[in-house]
Amino acid sequence: MILTVCKETADLEKRVALTPEAAEKLNNNGVEVRIEAGAGTASSYNDLAYEEKGIKIEPDRKKLFSESDLMLAVNTPPEEDIRNMKPGSVLICFLWALQNPELVALLKKQKITALGLDAVPRISRAQSMDALSSMSNIAGYRSVLIGASELDRYLPMMMTAAGTIPPAKVLILGAGVAGLQAIATAKRLGAVVEAYDIRPVVKEQVESLGAKFVEVPNVDEDTETEGGYAKEASEAQQQKQKEVMHDHVSKSDIVITTALIPGKKAPLLVPESMVNDMKPGSVVVDLAAEQGGNCEVTEAGKTITHNGVRVVGPLNLPSTLAYHASQLYAKNLMSLLSLLLKEGKLEFDFEDEIVHHTTVTHDGEIITPMLKNDS
């Protein structure tokens, strides 16, 4: 079986699907691994590092795709590349099938078995395969560094001969994987940290990291999906959130927003009126910028100044730490492949919950219940 890794073509993308070490393990497991020339260069893994591990470097991208039995990527390859794949071949990457119905239709037509790492169920057995969590962890860490860099003040308390500087106040909106890592990073840098999430169940996790959990009174609705993701709040609930959040946002030096709803536009948490009431020099880092933003004035991919407040809309933060992001992503892939690769051959057991949910298309049919439920 020929397993291939392509060079990423998306803007701002520096990650690679397999590191040399991961590729070597697969190459010694009954498969032939080929990687496109220069695929790992942007993440500090050059071609020589792969060649030293016995991996074949393929300069011809069209040949790479046409001869591939199993293609590994970070992002979905362009349509032209998918059309070059042979029927029955397998593609594993971030697919975002809910947002890309035309892609799903193409994969069905080409009879490609496609697995979306964004569809891995959040169950304990699948934790080692959860690439979304791996990448969100990086984004949460990086968001605090961005906030600290943009802020014109210290984060920790500073006691100097010229006087004592109080610590900065950081507010994290959304306490998923990214939010929890942001909390931990901001605390390590010495800030006073508050956090809010529509799921009261995460209060204990927030407090265990040393942050204060901001509570919205009279919350009585279910705010969490079976998979552990946040659900979209009702209009009444959103109004309660805004009333409580306005006070906390206006007093914060840095606000980091991380709230995402799978398959939907990001919820609005920080309207323009809140930004207008923040102190000049304060910073908003909006991790949901790519999905429309949690802050009303966010501009994706830009840093703007609104009424004296710096508003950052970063894109693809995991790629900014491409070396370690690629390491983690490769380990997520290896864990998933441990379910599929049996003596150098791919086997799909759709009775397995992980395989069932992660497989988007197979033999011209939709497999994942995520899309079946959506339709």
Image: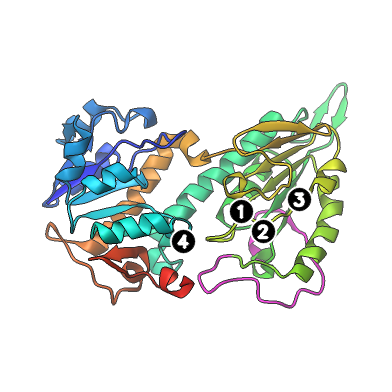
Say left or right for 124 vs 197. left
| First-in-chain label (1 vs 4) | 4
Instruction: Say which residue label 3 marks.
Output: 270
Query: Foreground residue, 10 or 123?
Result: 10
* C-beta proximity under 8 Å, tags 3 and 2: no
Magenta span covers which residues? 204-229
Spot occupied by residue 190 in the image (x, y as percentages of width and height): 71, 39
Horizontal and vertical percent position of residue 96: 44, 55
Question: What crowding class fits label 2: few (fewer than 14 Cα within 10 Å), some (14-19), or many (20 or more)?
Answer: many
- Structural distance between the alpha carbons of marks 3 and 2: 20 Å
Residue at horizontal 58 percent and vertical 46 percent from the top:
140
Residue plotted at (14% across, 51% down) = 29
Could you give the CA–CA distance between mark 2 and mark 1, rounded to whole angstroms? Answer: 7 Å
Marked residue nearer the N-terminal end (1 or 3)? 1
Q: Nearer the viewer, mark 2 or mark 4?
A: 4
Q: Which of pointers 2 and 4 lies earlier in the amino acid sequence?
A: 4
Image quadrant where residue 201 sits? bottom right
Residue under label 2: 206
**Looking at the picture, which amino acid does disc 1 mark?**
Leu
Of residue 4 and residue 89, the one placed in the foreground of this image is 89
Residue in the image at 81% along x and 43% along y: 275
State the separation of the CA atoms marked 4 and 3.
26 Å
Name the residue that disc number 4 marks: 98
The residue positioned 70% from the left and 53% from the top of the image is 173
Pointer 4 local density, CA inside 10 Å: few below 14, some 14–19, many at least 20: some
Q: Secondary structure at mark 3?
A: loop
Q: Earlier in the sequence, mark 2 or mark 1?
A: 1
Q: Distance of mark 1 from mark 4, alpha carbons? A: 26 Å
